[in-house]
Image (cartoon, grey):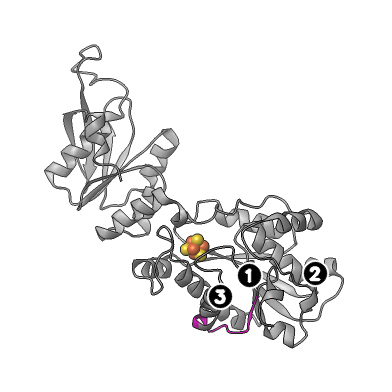
Amino acid sequence: MPNNIKKSGFSNGVKAIGLISGGLDSILAVKIVAEQGIKVIGVTFITPFNDDDFGKRAVLLAEQLDINCKLIHISEEFLDMLKSPRYGYGKNLNPCIDCRILEFKKAHQLMRELGASFIITGEVLGQRPMSQNKNSLELIEKKSGAEGLIVRPLCGKLLSPTTAERRGWIDRNKLFDINGRSRKKQYALAKQFNISGYSSPAGGCLLTDPGFSLITKNLLRSDMLDIGSIGLIKTGRYFTISDSFKLVVGRDEKENLKLMGLARSEDVIFQPQTKGPVAIGMGKRENENLQMACRIVAYYCKSPHPYIGGGGKDTRVSIKISYDGKEKIITCTRISESELSKYRV
Ligand code: SF4
């Protein structure tokens, strides 16, 4: 007998898919339903805009309830959707309504494949302006094809009864009526259920971050947004040299190493011949683009060109650039602070 059923004391043989994001609400929602004897199969959807530990955090959190959590990558579909979301973007570049439709479609499909009867989510009415108002919840449910099958235990008492309640699989009286942005009730429940180690409410998706959204938008406009370029912008400082050439510069040794690992065959690698960052260029390798990229990399170099010398007064730096199996050295002057700001997003 699985441990989660042992813990809750009984099993009615019904299974549910529990969407787990690593945040508190989703794990509470799962717990509330598991307590009613439902076997929960945890599922975490991973998009390119989650940080590297997102899946790991969700798995660890699910383990506290003795629930296995499947990590499902939806990167390609997510990117296609992000390029033109039918219901638009939120405050930043977050296409929350389309994203939820996509995730519930996937969850619904999985539900049928795994013989589960409904889906659990930690959504709270009124918590997020775009995707968690009554109209949006209904729209998302309808468009995902999972009408009546989505149980939202934290606010279930405020919504129409779902199939799970109507069929008596779960007791509606044991659901909650949480509404709005305050998280007091959730923290009290976490204490009651002895749940810890959850992420902060904004910790999951980089598309809710204004700065990251601007960078993503910049790449999107230049038709350069793909899984590889997202990996790079998640790692280092971003500069837009032109519409056709973008640069990501490492901030420290760890980022330098990571960028080297992420560089694709079509990218340009910039490596200073003195102490300085690694940078990766994406796009058209026109001479002007490469020269400007070198000047930006040079800005972050610690010391002057080792051969030219100059006792710190000489601002020239030599940068090795590599692409297509070829290498060349460009010696350039550092860009000034004021000029540099023009290339930031
Ligand atoms: S914040 Fe990101 S992951 Fe969450 S619903 Fe919106 S787009 Fe999807």
Q: What residue do we see at 33% from left, 48% from top? A: 263
Q: How many marks?
A: 3
Mark positioned earlier in the residue sequence (2 or 1): 2
For mark 2, what is the residue?
Answer: 35
- Verify whether residue 146 appears in magenta: yes
Let me know if residue 16 is in the magenta part: no
**Where is residue 183 drawn, in percent x and y?**
67, 56
Residue sitting nearer the eye, 104 or 342: 342
Q: Amino acid at mark 2?
A: Glu
- What is the C-alpha distance between the residues marked 2 and 3? 25 Å
Residue 24 position by quadrant:
bottom right
The earlier-in-sequence mark between 2 and 3 is: 2
Query: In terms of secondary structure, where does tag 3 sit?
Result: helix
Q: Residue at x 76, y 78 (%)?
A: 172
Q: Which residue is mark 1?
A: 121
Over which residues does the magenta segment extend? 143-151
Instruction: Give neighbour class at mark 3: few <14, some 14-19, many 20+ (Cα, 10 Å).
Output: many
* 336 w.r.t. 145: above or below: above
**Mark 2 within 8 Å of ligand 1, using the beta carbon:** no
Residue type at tag 3: Leu
Asked whether residue 147 is in view, the answer is: yes
Q: Of callouts 1 and 3, which one flags the residue occurring earlier in the amino acid sequence?
A: 1
- How far apart in space, not on screen, are marks 1 and 3 (Cα)? 11 Å
Q: Position of residue 221 (x, y in %)?
A: 26, 59
Q: What residue lies at 81% left-to-right and 81% top-to-bottom? A: 12
Q: Secondary structure at mark 2?
A: loop
